[in-house]
Amino acid sequence: YARLVVNPQDEAAFRRAINVPARGIGKSSVAKIEAQASLLEDSLMCGAESLRAQRALRGKARAGLEAFCEALECARLSEETASATLLQLYRAVGLLSEGSLVARDGDKDRERAENIHELLADIQAWEREAQAPSLEAYLQQVKLISDTETEAGDEGAVALMTVHASKGLEF
């Protein structure tokens, strides 16, 4: 979600976020969004916004797309801190409720909630230290650290990675 707020053109971030948590936007609705984006020769987010404006989807998919687009739009326009913006976004999309994850999958949701809280805590700590804190600046800083870690290997050394790191964080 954070990458999609900063860059609505990010196709991978859009695909990860569009139906997490489930909001009634299934494969056929995503196919319609892809077709619209292709027709417009633009991003999936623009295709989704276009379908939303046309009211082209029905039922749960329409309501889910409305909520998704509105939440992202509010996050993009927010003048709050990066951590406050993400907290509001995660609540708006249904990942967090009253500070904790909405219970659906037990252990999986608990782990996801811990990841979200860890992310928010890291952003808050970074905001206290940064000269010009913003969500975009935070994501760039995290990417730079990640790139540095992957390039810092010694010649002939074995690179190790945890399963969690290989899957990536869900934010």
Image (cartoon, rainbow, N blue to C red):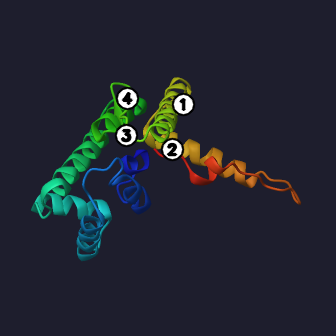
Gap in angstroms between the C-alphas marked 3 and 2: 29 Å
The mark nearer the N terminus, 4 or 1, is 4
Q: Assess disc 3: are there few (<14), some (14-19) or many (≥20) residues with their C-alpha within 10 Å of its C-alpha.
A: few
Residue 51, horizontal then vertical, whole percent? 17, 63
Mark 2 highlights which residue?
Answer: 139
Please state the horizontal and vertical placement of residue 139, each as a whole percent of the image: 51, 44
Kind of element beneath mark 3: loop
- Place of residue 32 in the rendered image (x, y in percent of width and height, measured from the top left): 23, 70
Q: What is the distance, in whole Å, between disc 4 and disc 1 at their CAs?
A: 12 Å
Mark closer to the observer (3, 2): 3
Residue 75 place in picture, x, y as percent: 30, 40
Residue 104, disc: 3
Which of the two discs, 3 and 2, labels the residue nearer the N terminus? Answer: 3
Task: Report, in whole angstroms, how far the alpha carbon at label 4 lies from the one at label 3.
Answer: 24 Å
Secondary element at tag 4: helix
The amino acid on which the numbered mark 3 sits, given as a three-letter code, is: Arg
Type of amino acid under label 2: Leu
